[in-house]
Amino acid sequence: KNQVEQSPQSLIILEGKNCTLQCNYTVSPFSNLRWYKQDTGRGPVSLTIMTFSENTKSNGRYTATLDADTKQSSLHITASQLSDSASYICVVSATGGSYIPTFGRGTSLIVHP
Amino acid sequence: EADIYQTPRYLVIGTGKKITLECSQTMGHDKMYWYQQDPGMELHLIHYSYGVNSTEKGDLSSESTVSRIRTEHFPLTLESARPSHTSQYLCASSRDVYNYGYTFGSGTRLTVV
C-alpha cells in the first residue's frame, strides 16, 4: 500500500531560525513528489515539485531535497518568518495504478516572534 | 496563480437542506478531485473524475454526490445536509495522469447547524 509519512507532526521555532521537515514514502513506481504549504482555512499551495531525476529544488527560502533511493524527501526553510506558520504537506504520485496522489498528514509549523 | 475557483467560500445552512458546492477550473484539466478536511487534520479524497461523464468514489465514504457534465465544472451536492457534514471541502485538478500541475481551490468552509 502506498504511504507517505511526515515528521515531525508539529514544530515550533523562533522567527529567523531554520528548520527541516521530513517526508518518507513507499509509493511505487515513483513519478513525482510535491511539497505544499497550507495556511489555516485555505487550500494548499504548491511550493516545489520534483521528479525522479531531481534531487534539489528551491523556491525562495524553501529548499526541497529528494533521495529516490532511500525514498526520503526534506523541506528546509531558511530564516523563518511569521508568515511561514502553516501546515506543510508532502504529496507523492505514482506512474501507475489509479494515479491518485498519496498525501502525508502534514507538519504543522508555528513560528513565534 | 490558481485558476480553479470554488464557491461559496463560506456557507452556513440548516439541517436537511440540499446544497451544491461549485468548483470550476479554466486550465482545461481532465482530472478533478474533491477532498474533505477537518480543522488541523489531513485531506481525505471523497470523489474524483478522469473526465466528462467519469466519476469515482474516493477513499473516504461520503454521502455527497458529484457530476462531470463539462470539463471545467465539477460540482458536489449534499441532498440533505447534517451537522456531521460540517467540514472544509477542497477541489483540485491536474493536467495529466502523473498529476503535474496539481492545483487546489481555496476551499468551501461548510457549517451545518
Image: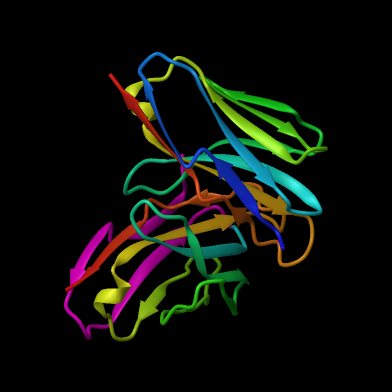
At 55% across and 63% down in the image, what residue appears?
Answer: B32
Camera-side residue of A3 and B35 = A3
Q: How many marks?
A: 0
At 61% across and 48% down in the image, what residue appears?
Answer: A5
Check the image and tell me how it is coloured.
rainbow
User: Was residue B12 drawn as part of the magenta stretch in this picture?
Assistant: yes
| Left or right of residue B60: residue B10 | left
Q: In x, y percent, where is residue B108?
A: 32, 60
Q: Is residue B80 visible?
A: yes
Q: In x, y percent, where is residue A108?
A: 42, 39
Q: Can residue B72 be seen in this view?
A: no
Where are the magenta residues, as a range?
B1-28
The quarter of the displayed image where residue B12 is located: bottom left
| Left or right of residue B38: residue B9 | left
User: Was residue B55 drawn as part of the magenta stretch in this picture?
Assistant: no
Q: In x, y percent, where is residue A51?
A: 75, 39
Camera-side residue of B47 and B32 = B47
Dividing the image into 4 quarters, which one contains the C terminus of chain B?
bottom left
At 46% across and 55% down in the image, what residue appears?
Answer: B42
Camera-side residue of B64 and B3 = B64
Q: In this view, does A39 lie above or below B82?
A: above
Q: In x, y percent, where is residue A1?
A: 72, 63
